[in-house]
Amino acid sequence: MANKYEAVKSDIKAILKKDGYDDGNLGPVFIRLAWHASGTYDKHTKTGGSDGATMRFAPESSDPANAGLDKARAFLEPVKAKHSWISYADLWTLAGVTAVEALGGPTIPWAPGRSDKPAKGIKASDVPPNGRLPDAAQGASHIRDVFYRMGFDDRDIVALSGAHTLGRCHTDRSGFSGPWTYSPTKFSNQYFIQLVNNTWTVKKWDGPLQYEDPTGELMMLPTDLALIQDAKFKPIVEKYAKDRAAFYADFAKAFGKLLDLGVKRQAKI
Ligand code: HEM
């Protein structure tokens, strides 16, 4: 990677630790930003994806699925101000890559070359519609619809879901609450270990349906549990729970592919 991107990476790395914010690190929300910017891709119409940085515009900016990502984008503004030549689309995806690596995850293949759609004259039809990102309240067939539309297979889906080893749900963003693991700022295969080895029951609370472990400290979304309820997903979850290296290798490949969906590189970099 050219030195100027390495310089952006090191400035992203420098702002990750943040006392008083969640578990003290911006990495998880940067990974969610990179994923939601990219996860709108539709392979049939070749629309959506990280290229264009369309999350700056409605209706994508106000998609309920993206609640809280305005904060992630704002945290990156000082980096953008310092390196004004970089596109938002490259910056957001590079922030996700940098966070995975800085939190102890695998090296993610990433190349620059995304451009930003200009704000001037932007129309709602230039921006992916709401509803392309997954709904956590649903099950395996919905997950497949959404990820197959992007061009992923079952193994990719399970690998990508392993990102929930990091971060947490916020009642004021998604409505759900809590972390998936006891180490939400350290990349690992803990998410799969918890899915397989812990006991998950419906949480009794005045909120959306989610699951909790016997301590009540950890959580799983309906879509997370779908990964052990579905006969094809389950063996992949079990494999990643036992084989951290296999998860890291598959995650790196799938996350790199996700960030590159639909990217049209015009100029030589
Ligand atoms: C079926 C697929 C998925 C569903 C339904 C889903 C749903 C959610 C929900 C509801 C939250 C909580 C948001 C909040 O309240 O702040 C969340 C957080 C998160 N998601 Fe996913 N997700 C999915 C797949 C993915 C993928 C593919 C990745 C990345 C590769 C990812 C990375 C994350 C991260 C890192 C967080 C934590 C964010 C934070 O701590 O602020 N998720 N997800």
Image: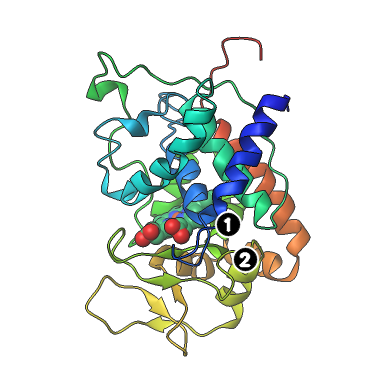
Q: Earlier in the sequence, mark 1 or mark 2?
A: 1
Q: Is residue 123 left or right of residue 110?
A: left
Residue 158 disc label: 1
Q: Residue furthest bottom?
A: 214
Q: Is residue 151 left or right of residue 256?
A: left
Quarter of the image with the N terminus is top right
Q: Quadrant of ligand 1?
A: bottom left
Looking at the picture, how far across and down is residue 101, in whole percent? 68, 50
Check disc 2: other Cα within 10 Å, few if <14, some if 14-19, many if 20+.
many
**For the residue labelled by badge 1, is the local secondary structure a helix, a strand or a loop?**
helix
Looking at the picture, how far across and down is residue 236, in whole percent? 64, 62
Q: Residue at x 22, y 78 (%)?
A: 206
Q: Residue at x 58, y 69 (%)?
A: 191
User: Contact, CB < 8 Å: mark 1 with mark 2?
Assistant: yes
Instruction: In the rendered view, tell whether residue 190 sits above or below residue 266.
Output: below
Q: How many marks?
A: 2
Q: Is residue 75 left or right of residue 254?
A: left
Three-letter code, disc 1:
Val
Q: Which image quadrant for residue 205?
A: bottom left
Q: Which image quadrant for residue 129?
A: top left
**For the residue labelled by badge 2, is the local secondary structure a helix, a strand or a loop?**
helix
Q: 43 or 266: nearer the eye?
A: 266
Q: 33 or 151: nearer the eye?
A: 33
Looking at the picture, how far across and down is residue 14, in whole percent? 61, 47
Residue 78 disc label: none
Residue under label 2: 237
Instruction: In the rendered view, tell whether residue 9 sits above or below residue 211.
Output: above
